[in-house]
Every structure is written in structure tokens, then in C-alpha cells.
Amino acid sequence: MNWILGTAPIPSYRDPLREEIAAWPELGAALATGSTVVAQRAAPDETPVINAATPVGVRGEMLLATRNATDITQSVRDARQTLAIVLAVTLMISIQLSLFLARTIVQPLRTLVRAAIRVRSGRDREVVVPRLPERGDEIGLLARAISDMTTALRQKIDSVETFAADVAHEIKNPLASLRSTLESLGKVEDPQLRSELRAIAAHDVQRIDRLVTEIAEASRIDAELSRTQFVPVDLLGLARALIAARGERGANGDCRVRITAPDAGPLEVPGDAARLERVIENLLDNAISFSPPRGAVTVALSRLDERIELCVSDEGPGIPAEAREQVFERFHSLRPPSEEFGSHSGLGLAIARTIAEAHEGTLTARDRSDGKPGACLVLDLPASEVDE
């Protein structure tokens, strides 16, 4: 124990060979200094021997007291034994606590790590990330967050794979038509027929160009919106400016487009003005394409609590209830009979819904509120926070 604690060595006690003052160092030191001298030595059994020497009287008499303090040794040994027991118990408790922590913390974390590695490697398509619903601590929150993240990642991967397959299918059709037209063009001598074939080829090229443009827009829109800093946008002013610009360039055809809005309160939403303009543009294009000749298209804005709604209504045939979600699917091909084939890519409403969801909003289809025939597409967005 002395070696462990690093205590200074204590000189050993030995009885002097002669009974005189010089044989006792404590007596010599006390005689020389005229004061009391106390010294400790170690007996053969390592118990302390305490010598105390002090001068008495005026004629040089000296008093030497010696005590072998075995009770002190026993008290120290008892204290050390108690300390050793306490340390042993503490070590056992620490080991048990470590095993408990390993079972309750380390083990779930290792399970999550293994699941994350399997998801990353892609070896197991149906990897189940444990959600640990019985745990309400941070480990449980982490497990559920990783599980939700994995589910969202799988949905994103599935969406990308489906989108890639749809892109291949949609581009393959105009390419096949273009190839057939070009092959026939070299075999036809009739000038009128050659002119018609060239027109078909030009139309196919336009279809491919339109598809590539819309596909590029749809593929990069999520990444761009994730980096965009949203600012307050006056939705009413944006809609009015867009309708006026479309009227100047004749984009509305012979349809009448009018806008209605409440008089009280601002209609501002947090977002990207260019992207929100794209949503309104797509909704107007869709409404005008399904409207009858000289039909009316209404853009109505309203505030509902902390939300702002923009409804675009037309007087067309409307959307059946069972097809109201399909119209927002990519490459949806339901178009009015009067519209030229291939003039739309089928991505407009899908892109519009993606933009709405990126703005924490929704884009849905429903019946007109006035009961008249026609479709009503509703853009619902959160209103900007306004200080009192």
C-alpha cells in the first residue's frame, strides 16, 4: 500500500546497544536544541513506533517516551479494508451499469447502424429500420427519424425509377415516329406527300424538344427549390400581372379570364415568385385548353385563417372524381379532343403540384363551388406571418 500511495520510507526501529543519550538520536537532538523532538519509526511488524524526547529540569535531565501505536495501525488497516470493499462494490456496480447501458443504448445504436449500412449498400430492398416505439428517449426519436428518412428515400428512389421509365417511354414514341417518317421520306417521290412527311418530322422534333425541356425542368425543380430563399410574394399582384401579360401576347385565346379577390388584408405567401408564377401559368393553360370557345376562366383568391387559396375554374367538361388525382401524375395524357396530339408533355400539373408542395402547400382538383359544370383547381398556400 505504501508503494501504491508513494509514501516516503520510514526508518526501522532498533533498540540501542548502550543505555546512554548518544545512542538515542531523539535525545541528542532534544539536548542540542533544548526543545521537544518527536520521531516515527517502523517496528518489524510495520506498526509505528513513536519516540518523543524533551529536556526536563535545569541540570540536563532528559525524558524519553516511546510508544508502539498498534491501535493506529489497526485503524488504518480497517479503513483500507473498508475502502477496498467500497471500491470493489463500486467496480461491480460500474460493470453492471456498463452492461445495462450496452444493452439499452449501444445495442439499439448498433442495430440502427447495421440497418443504415444495408440501406446504403442496397443489398436488401426491404430493409426494416426498427422504430423502437416503446422508447420515448432520444434513442427512440433517432430510430423513428431514421425510419422516416429511409421511407422517404425509398419513395424518392421509386419516383426517380418510375420517372426514368416514363421518360424512356414518352421519348420513344416520337423517336419511333420520326424514324419511320425519315425512312419513308427517302422512298416517296410525290412532292405533296414528301411535304406532309417533313411536317410530321418537324412536329416530332418539336414534341421531343418540348419533352426534353419539361423533363429537365421536372428533374431539377426539387434541387433548385431546396436552395431557394423564400420571400413574401403578393399572390394577388402576381396573378394580375400574369393575366395581363398573357392577354397582351394572346395566350388566352378567345377565353375571358377574370380575377376576384377580397378587399381586406394582404394576400402574401412565402415563396419564390418565379415558381409560383409557373404554377398559375400551368393552371391557366390547363383551364383554357379545356374551355369551350369564348368560355370564361375565373381566378378567385381568398384567405382562410392562416392559409390563402387560389382557385382556377373553367367551363369545360370537368374532371371525374375518380380521375382527380390522376391529372397530377407525370405524363398524364387526358387532353381535350380538339387539341392537337403531342402539343403538351403531360408534366405541367405534376410540376405545379411539386412546386406547391415545396412551398408547404397543396394543389388539388374539385367541383366548382357554384355548382356549374367545369373543373376547379385549387392552390392552397400558407400565408406570410404579419406582425400585429
Image: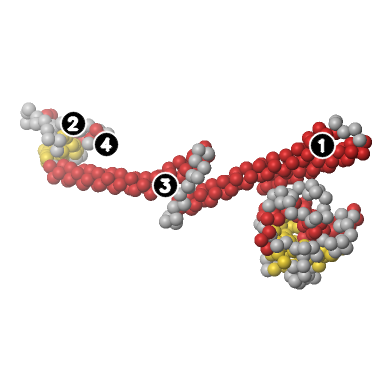
> Distance from label 3 to label 2 (Cα)?
59 Å
Which is more foreground, mark 1 or mark 4? 1
Kindly identify which residue carries mark 2. Answer: 11
**Can residue 224 be seen in the rendering of this structure?**
no
Q: Amino acid at mark 2?
A: Pro
Q: Residues within 10 Å of mark 1 (few under 14, many from 20)?
A: some
* Pointer 2 or 1: first along the chain: 2
Q: Residues within 10 Å of mark 2 (few under 14, many from 20)?
A: few
Q: Pointers 3 and 4 in contact (CB under 8 A)?
A: no
Q: Quadrant of the C terminus?
A: bottom right
Kindly identify which residue carries mark 1. Answer: 181
**Can residue 232 be seen in the rendering of this structure?**
yes
Which is more foreground, mark 3 or mark 1? 1
Secondary structure state at the residue bearing disc 2? loop
Q: Position of residue 373 (x, y in %)?
A: 77, 67
Q: Position of residue 137 (x, y in %)?
A: 44, 54
Residue found at x 11% / y 30%: 14
Secondary structure state at the residue bearing disc 4? helix
Above/below status of 199 relative to 320: above
- Residue 5 has which mark? 4
Q: Amino acid at mark 3?
A: Pro
Q: Pointers 1 and 4 in contact (CB under 8 A)?
A: no
Q: Amino acid at mark 1?
A: Thr
Q: Position of residue 239 (x, y in %)?
A: 81, 59
Secondary structure state at the residue bearing disc 1? helix
Q: Residues within 10 Å of mark 4 (few under 14, many from 20)?
A: few
Q: Is residue 132 left or right of residue 285?
A: left
Above/below status of 127 relative to 19: below
Kindly identify which residue carries mark 3. Answer: 108
Above/below status of 224 relative to 326: above
